[in-house]
Image: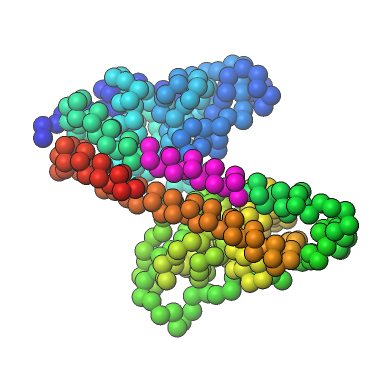
Protein backbone atom coordinates (compact mmCIF):
# COMPACT_ATOMS: atom_id res chain seq x y z
CA UNK A 1 0.00 0.00 0.00
CA UNK A 2 1.43 3.36 -1.02
CA UNK A 3 1.55 6.02 1.65
CA UNK A 4 2.66 9.60 2.23
CA UNK A 5 4.29 11.10 5.31
CA UNK A 6 1.98 13.87 6.55
CA UNK A 7 2.14 16.15 9.57
CA UNK A 8 -0.76 17.16 11.76
CA UNK A 9 -0.71 20.57 10.07
CA UNK A 10 -1.16 18.90 6.68
CA UNK A 11 -4.44 17.33 7.72
CA UNK A 12 -5.83 19.49 10.52
CA UNK A 13 -6.31 22.96 11.89
CA UNK A 14 -4.75 23.10 15.35
CA UNK A 15 -5.91 25.48 18.07
CA UNK A 16 -4.04 25.84 21.36
CA UNK A 17 -6.23 26.92 24.24
CA UNK A 18 -5.89 30.20 26.14
CA UNK A 19 -7.56 30.81 29.49
CA UNK A 20 -9.62 33.97 29.96
CA UNK A 21 -9.14 36.07 33.11
CA UNK A 22 -10.80 34.64 36.18
CA UNK A 23 -12.90 37.79 36.51
CA UNK A 24 -14.56 36.90 33.19
CA UNK A 25 -15.53 33.38 34.30
CA UNK A 26 -18.66 32.19 36.09
CA UNK A 27 -20.70 29.10 36.90
CA UNK A 28 -24.09 30.72 36.30
CA UNK A 29 -24.28 30.07 32.56
CA UNK A 30 -23.36 33.59 31.40
CA UNK A 31 -21.53 33.63 28.10
CA UNK A 32 -19.90 30.65 26.37
CA UNK A 33 -19.14 27.25 27.97
CA UNK A 34 -15.50 27.10 29.10
CA UNK A 35 -13.31 24.00 29.30
CA UNK A 36 -9.92 24.21 30.98
CA UNK A 37 -9.10 20.50 31.08
CA UNK A 38 -10.66 17.04 31.08
CA UNK A 39 -12.42 17.34 34.44
CA UNK A 40 -15.71 17.85 32.61
CA UNK A 41 -15.01 15.24 29.92
CA UNK A 42 -17.67 12.59 29.44
CA UNK A 43 -17.51 9.34 27.49
CA UNK A 44 -17.64 11.27 24.22
CA UNK A 45 -18.76 14.84 24.95
CA UNK A 46 -17.90 17.18 27.85
CA UNK A 47 -20.36 18.54 30.39
CA UNK A 48 -19.26 22.14 31.00
CA UNK A 49 -19.73 23.66 34.44
CA UNK A 50 -17.88 26.92 33.80
CA UNK A 51 -18.64 29.78 31.43
CA UNK A 52 -16.88 32.89 30.21
CA UNK A 53 -18.01 36.22 28.83
CA UNK A 54 -14.59 36.75 27.29
CA UNK A 55 -13.58 33.66 25.28
CA UNK A 56 -10.03 33.74 23.95
CA UNK A 57 -9.91 30.55 21.89
CA UNK A 58 -13.06 28.89 20.55
CA UNK A 59 -13.44 25.27 19.45
CA UNK A 60 -16.30 24.62 17.05
CA UNK A 61 -18.87 21.84 17.06
CA UNK A 62 -17.30 18.53 16.02
CA UNK A 63 -13.74 19.46 16.99
CA UNK A 64 -11.52 16.97 18.78
CA UNK A 65 -10.32 18.13 22.20
CA UNK A 66 -6.95 16.95 23.53
CA UNK A 67 -5.57 17.50 27.03
CA UNK A 68 -2.05 18.94 26.86
CA UNK A 69 -1.18 19.50 30.53
CA UNK A 70 -0.94 17.55 33.77
CA UNK A 71 -1.49 13.92 34.68
CA UNK A 72 -4.37 13.63 32.20
CA UNK A 73 -2.30 14.45 29.08
CA UNK A 74 -3.78 12.54 26.16
CA UNK A 75 -7.41 12.45 27.27
CA UNK A 76 -9.74 13.24 24.38
CA UNK A 77 -13.36 14.31 23.83
CA UNK A 78 -15.44 15.87 21.06
CA UNK A 79 -17.32 19.15 21.17
CA UNK A 80 -21.08 19.05 20.66
CA UNK A 81 -21.31 22.87 20.75
CA UNK A 82 -19.04 25.89 20.52
CA UNK A 83 -16.82 26.08 23.60
CA UNK A 84 -14.02 28.30 24.84
CA UNK A 85 -10.91 26.27 25.62
CA UNK A 86 -8.33 27.14 28.26
CA UNK A 87 -4.61 26.46 28.16
CA UNK A 88 -5.04 22.88 29.36
CA UNK A 89 -6.54 21.89 26.01
CA UNK A 90 -5.86 21.92 22.29
CA UNK A 91 -8.44 21.29 19.58
CA UNK A 92 -8.14 19.66 16.16
CA UNK A 93 -10.39 20.06 13.13
CA UNK A 94 -9.79 18.10 9.94
CA UNK A 95 -9.13 20.10 6.81
CA UNK A 96 -11.24 17.56 4.90
CA UNK A 97 -14.43 16.79 6.84
CA UNK A 98 -15.93 16.24 10.27
CA UNK A 99 -15.80 12.52 9.59
CA UNK A 100 -12.07 12.75 8.91
CA UNK A 101 -11.54 14.39 12.31
CA UNK A 102 -12.23 10.96 13.73
CA UNK A 103 -9.13 9.67 11.95
CA UNK A 104 -7.08 12.27 13.80
CA UNK A 105 -8.36 10.80 17.07
CA UNK A 106 -7.23 7.33 15.97
CA UNK A 107 -3.83 8.61 14.85
CA UNK A 108 -3.25 10.35 18.20
CA UNK A 109 -4.48 7.29 20.10
CA UNK A 110 -2.06 5.06 18.22
CA UNK A 111 0.82 7.49 18.93
CA UNK A 112 -0.16 8.20 22.53
CA UNK A 113 2.70 6.27 24.14
CA UNK A 114 5.35 8.25 22.27
CA UNK A 115 3.41 11.50 22.85
CA UNK A 116 3.42 10.87 26.60
CA UNK A 117 7.11 9.98 26.57
CA UNK A 118 7.98 13.23 24.81
CA UNK A 119 5.85 15.39 27.13
CA UNK A 120 8.11 17.72 29.11
CA UNK A 121 8.05 17.88 32.90
CA UNK A 122 8.10 14.87 35.21
CA UNK A 123 5.74 16.18 37.90
CA UNK A 124 3.50 18.21 35.57
CA UNK A 125 3.72 16.88 31.99
CA UNK A 126 3.12 19.33 29.18
CA UNK A 127 2.73 18.88 25.42
CA UNK A 128 3.77 22.08 23.67
CA UNK A 129 2.55 23.58 20.41
CA UNK A 130 5.94 22.87 18.85
CA UNK A 131 5.73 19.21 19.80
CA UNK A 132 2.22 18.92 18.35
CA UNK A 133 3.31 20.56 15.11
CA UNK A 134 5.96 17.83 14.71
CA UNK A 135 3.46 14.96 14.86
CA UNK A 136 3.50 13.01 11.60
CA UNK A 137 2.29 9.70 10.19
CA UNK A 138 2.54 7.57 7.07
CA UNK A 139 -0.97 7.78 5.63
CA UNK A 140 -2.70 5.98 2.74
CA UNK A 141 -4.97 7.73 0.27
CA UNK A 142 -7.81 9.87 1.61
CA UNK A 143 -10.30 7.29 0.33
CA UNK A 144 -8.67 4.57 2.42
CA UNK A 145 -8.36 6.87 5.41
CA UNK A 146 -12.12 7.37 5.38
CA UNK A 147 -12.73 3.63 5.04
CA UNK A 148 -10.52 3.08 8.08
CA UNK A 149 -12.67 5.59 9.94
CA UNK A 150 -15.79 3.62 8.94
CA UNK A 151 -14.29 0.35 10.20
CA UNK A 152 -12.95 1.62 13.51
CA UNK A 153 -15.92 3.93 14.00
CA UNK A 154 -18.33 1.00 13.77
CA UNK A 155 -16.63 -0.52 16.82
CA UNK A 156 -16.81 2.78 18.70
CA UNK A 157 -20.46 3.23 17.78
CA UNK A 158 -21.31 -0.21 19.17
CA UNK A 159 -19.34 0.58 22.34
CA UNK A 160 -21.27 3.85 22.70
CA UNK A 161 -24.57 1.99 22.20
CA UNK A 162 -23.67 -0.46 24.96
CA UNK A 163 -22.76 2.40 27.28
CA UNK A 164 -26.09 4.12 26.65
CA UNK A 165 -27.86 0.83 27.31
CA UNK A 166 -25.96 0.50 30.59
CA UNK A 167 -26.98 4.00 31.61
CA UNK A 168 -30.62 3.01 31.06
CA UNK A 169 -30.21 -0.26 32.97
CA UNK A 170 -28.54 1.53 35.89
CA UNK A 171 -31.30 4.15 35.98
CA UNK A 172 -33.86 1.35 36.14
CA UNK A 173 -32.03 -0.37 39.01
CA UNK A 174 -31.52 2.84 40.98
CA UNK A 175 -35.10 4.00 40.41
CA UNK A 176 -36.38 0.76 41.92
CA UNK A 177 -33.89 1.01 44.80
CA UNK A 178 -34.98 4.57 45.57
CA UNK A 179 -38.68 3.71 45.33
CA UNK A 180 -38.33 0.77 47.73
CA UNK A 181 -35.58 1.76 50.14
CA UNK A 182 -35.56 5.57 50.19
CA UNK A 183 -39.19 6.51 49.58
CA UNK A 184 -40.56 3.19 50.97
CA UNK A 185 -43.15 3.31 48.18
CA UNK A 186 -44.54 -0.23 48.57
CA UNK A 187 -44.43 -0.04 52.38
CA UNK A 188 -45.95 3.34 53.19
CA UNK A 189 -49.04 2.22 55.07
CA UNK A 190 -48.57 3.99 58.41
CA UNK A 191 -49.42 0.98 60.58
CA UNK A 192 -46.49 -0.86 59.07
CA UNK A 193 -43.90 1.83 59.88
CA UNK A 194 -41.83 1.97 63.06
CA UNK A 195 -38.90 3.92 64.50
CA UNK A 196 -35.59 2.06 64.79
CA UNK A 197 -32.53 3.90 66.13
CA UNK A 198 -34.18 7.19 65.26
CA UNK A 199 -34.99 6.10 61.70
CA UNK A 200 -38.59 5.61 60.53
CA UNK A 201 -38.58 2.37 58.56
CA UNK A 202 -41.09 -0.33 57.60
CA UNK A 203 -41.95 -2.79 60.33
CA UNK A 204 -39.50 -5.69 60.86
CA UNK A 205 -36.66 -3.84 59.09
CA UNK A 206 -33.35 -3.38 60.89
CA UNK A 207 -30.97 -0.41 60.85
CA UNK A 208 -27.39 -1.65 60.91
CA UNK A 209 -23.86 -0.62 60.15
CA UNK A 210 -22.50 -1.79 56.82
CA UNK A 211 -19.74 -3.73 58.58
CA UNK A 212 -22.40 -5.94 60.16
CA UNK A 213 -23.71 -7.24 56.83
CA UNK A 214 -20.62 -7.24 54.58
CA UNK A 215 -17.01 -8.33 54.92
CA UNK A 216 -14.48 -5.56 54.29
CA UNK A 217 -11.13 -6.48 52.67
CA UNK A 218 -11.81 -10.09 53.58
CA UNK A 219 -9.00 -11.75 51.61
CA UNK A 220 -5.46 -10.69 50.72
CA UNK A 221 -2.74 -12.12 48.52
CA UNK A 222 -0.37 -14.09 50.75
CA UNK A 223 2.56 -16.46 50.60
CA UNK A 224 0.40 -19.47 49.71
CA UNK A 225 -1.25 -17.80 46.72
CA UNK A 226 -1.74 -20.66 44.21
CA UNK A 227 -1.21 -18.76 40.94
CA UNK A 228 1.98 -17.59 39.21
CA UNK A 229 0.32 -14.60 37.57
CA UNK A 230 -2.41 -12.10 38.45
CA UNK A 231 -4.92 -9.96 36.61
CA UNK A 232 -4.47 -6.62 38.34
CA UNK A 233 -7.15 -3.98 38.79
CA UNK A 234 -5.43 -0.62 39.25
CA UNK A 235 -7.23 2.48 40.51
CA UNK A 236 -6.65 4.25 37.19
CA UNK A 237 -8.51 1.50 35.32
CA UNK A 238 -11.79 1.95 37.21
CA UNK A 239 -14.34 4.66 36.50
CA UNK A 240 -17.93 5.01 37.64
CA UNK A 241 -19.01 1.40 37.39
CA UNK A 242 -16.65 0.83 34.46
CA UNK A 243 -13.46 -1.22 34.16
CA UNK A 244 -11.09 -0.29 31.33
CA UNK A 245 -9.25 -3.59 31.69
CA UNK A 246 -6.85 -5.53 33.86
CA UNK A 247 -3.07 -5.82 33.61
CA UNK A 248 -1.35 -9.20 33.68
CA UNK A 249 1.68 -9.47 35.99
CA UNK A 250 3.78 -12.33 37.31
CA UNK A 251 3.17 -12.48 41.05
CA UNK A 252 6.81 -11.73 41.84
CA UNK A 253 6.81 -8.70 39.56
CA UNK A 254 3.42 -7.29 40.53
CA UNK A 255 2.99 -3.80 42.00
CA UNK A 256 3.36 -3.68 45.77
CA UNK A 257 -0.27 -2.56 46.08
CA UNK A 258 -1.59 -5.70 44.34
CA UNK A 259 -3.01 -7.34 47.48
CA UNK A 260 -6.82 -7.34 47.54
CA UNK A 261 -8.43 -10.60 46.38
CA UNK A 262 -11.88 -10.25 44.83
CA UNK A 263 -14.70 -12.59 43.88
CA UNK A 264 -17.98 -12.46 41.97
CA UNK A 265 -20.54 -10.24 43.72
CA UNK A 266 -18.00 -7.97 45.41
CA UNK A 267 -18.15 -4.21 45.01
CA UNK A 268 -14.84 -2.37 45.08
CA UNK A 269 -14.57 1.33 45.94
CA UNK A 270 -11.52 3.58 45.51
CA UNK A 271 -10.64 5.07 48.88
CA UNK A 272 -8.99 8.11 47.27
CA UNK A 273 -11.06 11.14 46.24
CA UNK A 274 -14.45 9.45 46.69
CA UNK A 275 -16.18 12.33 44.91
CA UNK A 276 -14.78 10.87 41.67
CA UNK A 277 -17.04 7.82 42.13
CA UNK A 278 -14.49 5.19 41.18
CA UNK A 279 -16.28 1.95 41.98
CA UNK A 280 -16.96 -1.37 40.29
CA UNK A 281 -19.20 -4.41 40.60
CA UNK A 282 -17.17 -7.61 40.24
CA UNK A 283 -19.09 -9.81 37.80
CA UNK A 284 -17.05 -12.66 36.30
CA UNK A 285 -13.48 -12.16 37.47
CA UNK A 286 -10.65 -14.45 36.48
CA UNK A 287 -9.70 -16.70 39.41
CA UNK A 288 -6.43 -14.77 39.75
CA UNK A 289 -7.94 -11.26 39.80
CA UNK A 290 -6.32 -8.98 42.38
CA UNK A 291 -7.21 -5.36 43.16
CA UNK A 292 -5.05 -2.52 44.43
CA UNK A 293 -4.98 -1.74 48.14
CA UNK A 294 -6.28 1.63 47.02
CA UNK A 295 -9.69 -0.07 46.93
CA UNK A 296 -11.94 -1.21 49.72
CA UNK A 297 -13.42 -4.60 48.81
CA UNK A 298 -17.01 -5.09 50.03
CA UNK A 299 -18.18 -8.72 50.09
CA UNK A 300 -21.91 -9.22 50.81
CA UNK A 301 -22.77 -11.65 53.60
CA UNK A 302 -26.24 -10.85 54.94
CA UNK A 303 -27.60 -8.87 51.97
CA UNK A 304 -27.70 -9.61 48.20
CA UNK A 305 -24.87 -8.32 46.03
CA UNK A 306 -27.38 -6.31 43.97
CA UNK A 307 -28.67 -4.50 47.07
CA UNK A 308 -25.13 -3.79 48.29
CA UNK A 309 -24.08 -2.33 44.92
CA UNK A 310 -27.14 -0.09 44.67
CA UNK A 311 -26.76 1.09 48.28
CA UNK A 312 -23.09 2.07 48.05
CA UNK A 313 -23.43 3.86 44.71
CA UNK A 314 -26.17 6.32 45.69
CA UNK A 315 -25.37 10.02 45.79
CA UNK A 316 -26.08 9.96 49.52
CA UNK A 317 -23.43 7.31 50.10
CA UNK A 318 -20.92 9.22 47.97
CA UNK A 319 -21.63 12.35 50.02
CA UNK A 320 -21.12 10.35 53.22
CA UNK A 321 -17.71 9.13 52.03
CA UNK A 322 -16.67 12.57 50.80
CA UNK A 323 -17.57 14.25 54.10
CA UNK A 324 -15.63 11.61 56.06
CA UNK A 325 -12.46 11.64 53.92
CA UNK A 326 -9.18 12.60 55.60
CA UNK A 327 -6.76 15.09 54.02
CA UNK A 328 -7.43 18.10 51.85
CA UNK A 329 -4.82 17.69 49.09
CA UNK A 330 -5.28 13.92 48.81
CA UNK A 331 -8.59 13.07 50.51
CA UNK A 332 -8.95 9.38 51.34
CA UNK A 333 -11.46 7.23 53.19
CA UNK A 334 -10.42 4.62 55.76
CA UNK A 335 -12.07 1.17 55.71
CA UNK A 336 -13.71 1.85 59.07
CA UNK A 337 -15.67 4.71 57.49
CA UNK A 338 -17.28 2.16 55.18
CA UNK A 339 -17.90 -0.17 58.14
CA UNK A 340 -19.73 2.55 60.10
CA UNK A 341 -22.07 3.56 57.27
CA UNK A 342 -25.77 3.07 57.96
CA UNK A 343 -27.72 0.52 55.93
CA UNK A 344 -31.34 -0.58 56.14
CA UNK A 345 -31.78 -4.35 56.26
CA UNK A 346 -35.30 -5.23 55.11
CA UNK A 347 -37.08 -8.52 55.64
CA UNK A 348 -35.58 -11.45 53.71
CA UNK A 349 -38.53 -11.76 51.35
CA UNK A 350 -38.19 -8.07 50.40
CA UNK A 351 -34.47 -8.46 49.67
CA UNK A 352 -35.17 -11.62 47.65
CA UNK A 353 -37.81 -9.87 45.56
CA UNK A 354 -35.52 -6.88 44.93
CA UNK A 355 -32.64 -9.14 43.94
CA UNK A 356 -34.80 -11.07 41.49
CA UNK A 357 -35.67 -7.81 39.74
CA UNK A 358 -32.31 -6.00 39.86
CA UNK A 359 -29.66 -8.72 39.65
CA UNK A 360 -30.48 -9.40 35.94
CA UNK A 361 -30.10 -5.68 35.19
CA UNK A 362 -26.67 -5.55 36.82
CA UNK A 363 -25.68 -8.79 35.09
CA UNK A 364 -26.62 -7.36 31.68
CA UNK A 365 -24.65 -4.21 32.43
CA UNK A 366 -21.58 -6.30 33.19
CA UNK A 367 -22.00 -8.41 30.05
CA UNK A 368 -22.18 -5.23 27.98
CA UNK A 369 -18.99 -4.03 29.61
CA UNK A 370 -17.26 -7.34 28.85
CA UNK A 371 -18.35 -7.01 25.22
CA UNK A 372 -17.06 -3.43 25.11
CA UNK A 373 -13.64 -4.50 26.40
CA UNK A 374 -13.46 -7.13 23.65
CA UNK A 375 -14.56 -4.62 21.00
CA UNK A 376 -11.88 -2.21 22.20
CA UNK A 377 -9.29 -4.98 22.02
CA UNK A 378 -10.20 -5.80 18.40
CA UNK A 379 -10.31 -2.11 17.43
CA UNK A 380 -6.87 -1.50 18.96
CA UNK A 381 -5.53 -4.57 17.16
CA UNK A 382 -6.85 -3.35 13.80
CA UNK A 383 -5.80 0.29 14.12
CA UNK A 384 -2.02 0.10 13.49
CA UNK A 385 -2.40 -2.72 10.98
CA UNK A 386 -4.91 -0.83 8.88
CA UNK A 387 -2.75 2.28 8.90
CA UNK A 388 0.35 0.32 7.86
CA UNK A 389 -1.46 -1.74 5.23
CA UNK A 390 -0.65 -5.00 7.00
CA UNK A 391 -4.39 -5.73 6.96
CA UNK A 392 -6.30 -4.85 3.81
CA UNK A 393 -9.24 -2.52 4.26
CA UNK A 394 -11.64 -4.78 2.32
CA UNK A 395 -10.78 -7.79 4.47
CA UNK A 396 -11.20 -5.75 7.64
CA UNK A 397 -14.62 -4.53 6.47
CA UNK A 398 -15.84 -8.12 6.10
CA UNK A 399 -14.35 -9.16 9.44
CA UNK A 400 -15.99 -6.20 11.15
CA UNK A 401 -19.42 -7.11 9.80
CA UNK A 402 -19.07 -10.62 11.20
CA UNK A 403 -17.84 -9.46 14.62
CA UNK A 404 -20.55 -6.84 15.08
CA UNK A 405 -23.34 -9.10 13.83
CA UNK A 406 -22.37 -11.67 16.48
CA UNK A 407 -22.11 -8.93 19.14
Task: Tell me if residue 90 comes above or below residue 280 in the rendering.
Answer: above
> Which residues are the magenta region?
157-173
Q: Please indicate, yes or no, whether residue 7 appears anywhere in the rendered image.
A: yes
Can residue 276 be seen by looking at this rendering? no
* 137 lies left or right of 1: right
Which x, y percent locates residue 52? 61, 20
Left or right? Give the position of 197 relative to 82: right
Left or right side of 293 for 216: right
Residue 168 painted magenta: yes
Q: Quadrant of residue 162?
A: top left
User: 125 above or below 272?
Assistant: above
Main SS, magenta residues: helix
Identify whether 72 is placed above or below 365. Answer: above
Residue at image point 62% right, 68% down: 300
Q: Residue at x 43, y 40 (%)?
A: 161
Q: Residue lying furthest bottom in this view?
A: 224
Name the residue rendered at 52%, 32% in the picture: 46
Indicate whether residue 208 is drawn in magenta.
Answer: no
The reply, left or right, for residue 77 in relation to residue 31 is left
Amino acid sequence: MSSTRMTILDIAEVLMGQSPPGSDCNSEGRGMPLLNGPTEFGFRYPNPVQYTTNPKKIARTGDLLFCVRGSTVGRMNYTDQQVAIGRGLASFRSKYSTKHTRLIEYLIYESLESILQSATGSTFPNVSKEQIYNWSWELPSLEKQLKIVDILGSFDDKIALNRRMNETLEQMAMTLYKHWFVDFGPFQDGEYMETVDGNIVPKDWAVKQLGEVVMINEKSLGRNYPYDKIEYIDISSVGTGVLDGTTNYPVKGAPSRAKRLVQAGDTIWSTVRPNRKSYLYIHKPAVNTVASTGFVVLTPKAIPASYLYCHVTTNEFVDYLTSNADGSAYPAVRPDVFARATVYVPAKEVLKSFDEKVAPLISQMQENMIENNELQRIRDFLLPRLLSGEIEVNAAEEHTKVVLSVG
